[in-house]
Image (spheres, rainbow, N blue to C red):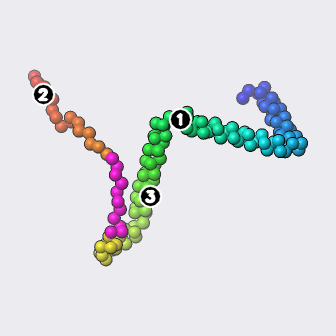
Amino acid sequence: MRRSAKPIVYVLITLGIFGLLASVITHPAQLMRQLLYMGIFAGIIYVLYRFVFRSPQSTTQDRQYLRAVKQSKHRSKTKSTTKGKPSARIHSVSGSSKGQSSSKTLKKKRSNTHLTVIEGKKGKKKNRAFF
């Protein structure tokens, strides 16, 4: 802000506080009604923005991003628990020798990562004549 604008801003803020206090003292019900109307108006604007102006593509991208973040956190959590506690690995090895019931509990179902392989032409040589 410029230096000349600061006193104007302070005067406006002071007048706003003075007006708010005066309306609280003289007409508190009217102030509450005005606040209710402002809240309803803000809610209508939010609903319009959320459902009308936002493209459906951005919401699907947001969902995909949140799913990727969740998977990443889950993977880092499982890696940190096995790396941080060497005793957990010892118990899991000794637990597997006890029987099949404990080994079934240690197996985790892996999530489907939906990866595809794109075959390229790296291994193929071009038919060129060298001099």
Quadrant position of residue 2: top right
Type of the residue with mark 3:
Lys
Q: Residue at x 86, y 38 (%)?
A: 18
Name the mark on residue 54.
1
Determine which quarter of the picture holds residue 50: top right
In the image: residue 54, left or right of residue 80: right
The residue that disc 2 covers is 127
Identify the image quadrant of the C terminus: top left
Per the image, label 2 sits on a secondary structure element best described as: loop
Q: Which residues are magenta?
A: 104-114
Confirm whether residue 70 shows in the render: yes
Write the residue at 40% across / 63% down. 82
The quarter of the rendered structure image containing the N terminus is top right
Name the foreground residue: 90 vs 55. Answer: 55
Between the residue at mark 3 and the residue at mark 1, the CA separation in whole angstroms equals 34 Å
Image location (x, y in percent) of residue 54:
53, 35
Q: Position of residue 106 (x, y in %)?
A: 35, 67
